[in-house]
Amino acid sequence: MSDITPFARLGAARVAAIVDRFYDLMEHDPAFAGLRAMHDADLTPMRSSLTGFLTAWLGGPRNWFSERPGTCVMSLHGAMPITPALGEQWVAAMDRAIAAEPDIAPDLAATLSTALGRVARAMARIPQAA
Ligand code: HEM
């Protein structure tokens, strides 16, 4: 098995591009209006925070964690009113953002979508197969 991290395969620019596309979709597509309504008017800090979180989560530089000692992203979301419908909006927007990344390796896109879908559905308390 390869020990190359998903971050190394993707590269920093693609992580940022996927996150930007995710928030662009949230901002402009009415399918994600419920998700948009939960967020601040200014999504700029979120673009930067989610990029930093995913960078670390995918095996890249861990600045997001070292700048927020002890922060748990699951606990952070546990305090939010995340319904199953909002969880599915998050998953759908992220799937689209990943799939639209030009020339992304299909296995990497599938792995990312599956793994992020599991995290989001856990946050939304949507039952899922182990
Ligand atoms: C399940 C559906 C989800 C919903 C409805 C949701 C919603 C939110 C909301 C409303 C915020 C606060 C935004 C603000 O302050 O304006 C937020 C922050 C954040 N979310 Fe989510 N989220 C979801 C899933 C996820 C997932 C799966 C991840 C990571 C893989 C994630 C990572 C983050 C991060 C890193 C922040 C920023 C924390 C900070 O810098 O304070 N979220 N989310």
Image (spheres, rainbow, N blue to C red):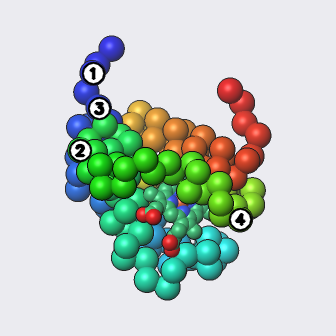
Work out whether 31 lies above or below 117. Answer: below
Query: Considering the image in quadrants, where does the C terminus appear?
Result: top right
Looking at the picture, how far across and down is residue 101, in whole percent? 36, 55
Q: CA distance from mark 4 to mark 2?
A: 30 Å
Q: Earlier in the sequence, mark 4 or mark 2?
A: 2
Residue type of the residue flagged with mark 2:
Pro
Write down the residue under mark 3.
5
| Residue 49 appears left or right of 84 | left
Label 4: which secondary element? loop
Q: Hey, which residue is sitting farthest top in the picture?
A: 1
Write down the residue under mark 1.
3
Q: CA distance from mark 4 to mark 1?
A: 37 Å
| Residue 91 appears left or right of 86 | left
Residue shown at 69% from the left, 61% from the top: 82
Write down the residue under mark 4.
81
Label 2: which secondary element? loop
Residue type of the residue flagged with mark 1:
Asp
Q: Earlier in the sequence, mark 4 or mark 3?
A: 3
Residue type of the residue flagged with mark 4:
Pro
Which mark is in front, 3 or 2? 2
Are the residues at dot 1 and dot 3 in contact (C-beta closer than 8 Å)? yes
Q: CA distance from mark 1 to mark 3?
A: 6 Å
| Residue 121 appears left or right of 52 | right
Q: Nearer the viewer, residue 24 or 5?
A: 5
Label 3: which secondary element? loop
Which mark is in front, 4 or 1? 4
User: Can you see residue 10?
Assistant: no
